[in-house]
Image (cartoon, grey):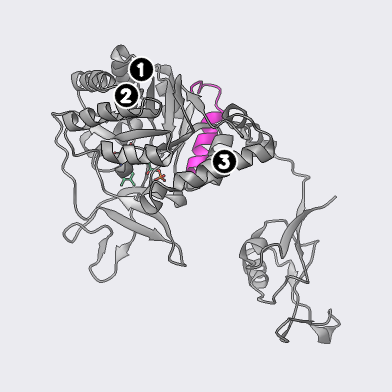
Amino acid sequence: MADLSVTIAGIRSPNPFWLASAPPTNTGDQCARAFDHGWGGVVWKTIAHSHDEIVNLSSRFGAVRTAGGALAGINNLELISDRSMSDNLAELAALKRRYPHNTVVASIATGPREQWRELVQCAEQAGADGLELNFSCPHGMCERGQGSAVGQDLSAIATITGWVKEVATRPVFVKLTPNITDICDPARAAVAAGVDGLSLINTLKSIAGVDLQRLAPYPIVDGRSSNGGLAGATIKPVALFMLASLARDPAVTVPLSGIGGVSDWRDCAEFMLLGASTVQVCTAAMIGGYRIVRDMHEGLSDWMDEMGFATTAEVIGRAVPNFVPWGELNPDYRVVSHIAPDKCIGCQRCYPACRDGGHDAIRLPSPKSGGKPCSVRQDGVAHRIPEVDERRCVGCNLCSFVCPVPGCITMRETG
Ligand SMILES: Cc1cc2nc3c(=O)[nH]c(=O)nc-3n(C[C@H](O)[C@H](O)[C@H](O)COP(=O)(O)O)c2cc1C
């Protein structure tokens, strides 16, 4: 059986599955239940200093759905923890005492230097294994010069990280905002300031939608709204790209904790392959509950066995060498579409997709013009089987995406 334990910035965790700083890590009771379900670590919902006033709004979340109605993401207006610093830290201390082998990282955010120092020292006294500096919330906090306002300002990153590192004795992570042109810039600033690890990404600045009767964006707070932060499966591609960008940046010499749309064991494996030592989950646990971690254990462990990976160290970063600048890709490589006649159900979705959105490489043969005879389905209905003109096909993959039959349209290497 593969060994799922992992060490990140000197912190040992029984497995790489952590809950991100968010509603699922709001209280000690919640985190205890999460550990009982098998989560290796938690990053506590961001703790504010006792001098900071945190007042949350209602309503708070907006839904982002696919055309089929599935919940693809959640946009939120929530601030950092509105519970007192003393309650948070007392519960964190009790949690760490009860679960000494699980990882408890304290996410913290405040303003003035003295308050940062006090938060660091109090969180460490409470037993936090590490600290995560929230330089990344893109709503509510940034308006007061915190959250993503820090993460977008390289000198502020350096200054505040420096304040924290002056007093911290445990590993310090900076949590990065994706609301920036190049994620490598803030990452390098944090590394230069002495940070021990980076967590990414927080949410993307967004509007979930607009209510067509009330004429206000979601989520609606007394008839009006503001931009929120988008999270969940829909942000995974952005998170993977930013993670991989840091993993291949020689100036980023610290370990990475990957966040953003992680929903199942496959996502965990993908994040680890692109450089994440641990993966943090928020929205998927909000939707599916803490129990989703069981599938992560089983799935990742089975996959590692199948691939011959004995330890997480063998997985972390393994796909990074295959993520290269565009100019290093082989222009002579070619794939073309192949349609399996015995699997085609004659839905013809591939035909207009290729004609209007591709390179007009799919033909619908007509028996009258000497094309192949129609195929007859099991239900007796005749249909035409599309054919691929390999000279026109550029290998874009679009037809295979719109085809509803698994394995019917495959892309084949030529030459
Ligand atoms: C409702 C909500 C509240 C959040 N609160 C915090 C927070 O207090 N501190 C923080 O660092 N990140 C916060 N986040 C961001 C998450 O930790 C995480 O970075 C983000 O949701 C992306 O992960 P996901 O796609 O798994 O949800 C919050 C996210 C949501 C959805």
Q: Are marks 1 and 2 in contact (CB under 8 Å)?
A: yes
Tell me where the magenta segment starts and ends, as one range.
238-254
The answer to whether residue 344 is magenta is no
Residue annotated with mark 2: 128
Give amino acid for label 3.
Leu
Residue annotated with mark 1: 170
CA distance for labels 1 and 3: 29 Å
Give amino acid for label 1.
Arg
Mark 2 C-beta closer than 8 Å to ligand 1? no
The disc, 1 or 3, on the residue closer to the chain's N-terminal end is 1
Q: Neighbour class for label 3 at 10 Å: few (<14), some, many (≥20)?
A: many
353 in relation to 138, above or below: below
Residue annotated with mark 3: 300
Residue closer to the observer: 232 or 37:
37
Q: Quadrant of residue 131?
A: top left
The image shows residue 331 at horizontal and vertical percentages of: 74, 44
Q: Quadrant of residue 309?
A: top right
Check disc 1 and report its element: helix, strand or loop. Answer: loop
Query: What residue is shown at x 48% (from left), y 41% (from top)?
Result: 239
